[in-house]
Image (cartoon, helix red, strand yellow):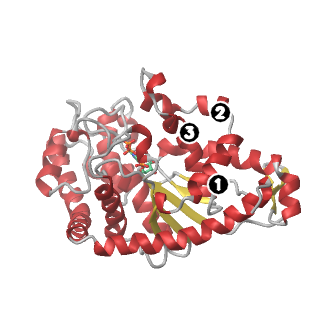
Amino acid sequence: MSEFKKLVFSGVQPTGNLHLGNYLGAIRKFVALQDGNDCVYCVVDMHALTAQLVHDDLRGQIRSIAAAFIASGIDPVRNIVFNQSAVPQHAELAWIFNCVARIGWMNRMTQFKDKAGKDREQASLGLYAYPSLMAADILVYRGTHVPVGDDQKQHLELARDIAMKFNLDYAEHIRKAGVGIDITVGDEPVHAYFPMVEPLIDGPAPRVMSLRDGSKKMSKSDPSDLSRINLMDDADAISKKIRKAKTDPDGLPSEIDGLKGRPEADNLVGIYAALADKSKIDVLAEFGGQQFSVFKPALVDLAVNTLSPITGEMRRLMEDTTHIDAILRDGGERARARAEVTMNEVRDIVGFLR
Ligand code: AQP
């Protein structure tokens, strides 16, 4: 038995202002993982068309996500940073995965149900097939580890199912092409072409919730800007949003159990803990018994101090986008070269003439 070479892949959609949830749930993990790992970070612009076909400034959004990656500390020389549409092999593999994935699997995807809303008949086919393209994004690099927020867990399970079915259905062809690796899945030996991707969800903030409603995740597409802290928000905006964040009338508890049934308080304590790199227990040890009128200003200071260097650097990078464009071009070339190696093997496995 052997192992696939570790490769970290993740992507972010250019669908609006990046927020604290994207930063804490994903981008900060990308930064930490670049030490000692081969990492590929992608602005998934093709996914941006699934829920909304026409965007006012898609190019600007793509650049702004890339700027957020760089401003947060991702090194585009050590890692590959690019936009998805620059590598057509993602779409090619996604088509093959559309034929591997079963309708029954897709019908279980909760994000499709949430995003399609009541009028599912009017949702795009792209939105429905989104998780298949996401599996291709990762597996076209034979990615093994995927840092994401908690909301992407189900999509990654689907990526594993697709990889497994491909490996089993094409086992004979993978063997003949001499491109597989013997791995164990559970207790089963499998001659695999695609690895079983591991989600990297754990972290201090796997699901940051809306500041207006502790039962909804913080999201770029929430119509209320007060629901999220954007990476481009200035100190005044951050202060206003945290001051206006929904809370309950009680003060902060001293024990973690005291946060049960108080989603908004839990969320603010979780955000503080993640930004300060502390546990919620430590935060409650410091603020337990205090009112939100004391806690919220402390959270504002912490959020502003953490985010303002990133915001400043993003603004600088966005003033003249030549640098960002050059990074994306270079990343695109390097990503295409790698993806083409995989696709040549996949074309052989499935039996296309080339
Ligand atoms: N609230 C969140 N808490 C923790 N992590 C989050 N992520 C998103 N929201 C939260 C993680 O951020 C990464 C990039 O997400 P995405 O842009 O690809 O799509 P998304 O998950 O659909 O994020 P949004 O912000 O809610 O965008 P819209 O509104 O466009 O759908 C992912 O790793 C995600 O888990």
Can residue 50 be seen in the rendering of this structure? yes
Does residue 154 appear to the left or right of 320 in the view shown?
right
Q: Earlier in the sequence, mark 3 or mark 1?
A: 3
Mark drawn on residue 105? 2
Task: Tell me where residue 308 appears, x and y as whole percent.
Answer: 21, 64
* Residue type, label 2: Trp
Task: Tell me where residue 129 appears, x and y as whole percent.
Answer: 56, 39
Disc 3 versus disc 1: distance between alpha carbons? 19 Å
Give the image quarter of residue 131: top right
Label 1 Cα crowd, 10 Å radius (few <14 / some 14-19 / many 20+): many
Q: Residue at x 59, y 28 (%)?
A: 107
- Would you name the residue on which mark 1 appears? 197
As helix, strand or loop, the secondary structure at mark 3 comes to: helix
* Residue type, label 1: Val
Q: Earlier in the sequence, mark 3 or mark 2?
A: 2
Label 3 Cα crowd, 10 Å radius (few <14 / some 14-19 / many 20+): many
Label 2 Cα crowd, 10 Å radius (few <14 / some 14-19 / many 20+): few
Does residue 246 appear to the left or right of 80 in the view shown?
left
Can residue 6 be seen in the rendering of this structure? no
As helix, strand or loop, the secondary structure at mark 1 comes to: loop
Q: Is mark 3 within 8 Å of ligand 1?
A: no
Q: Earlier in the sequence, mark 2 or mark 1?
A: 2
Q: Nearer the viewer, residue 264 or 125?
A: 125
As helix, strand or loop, the secondary structure at mark 2 comes to: helix
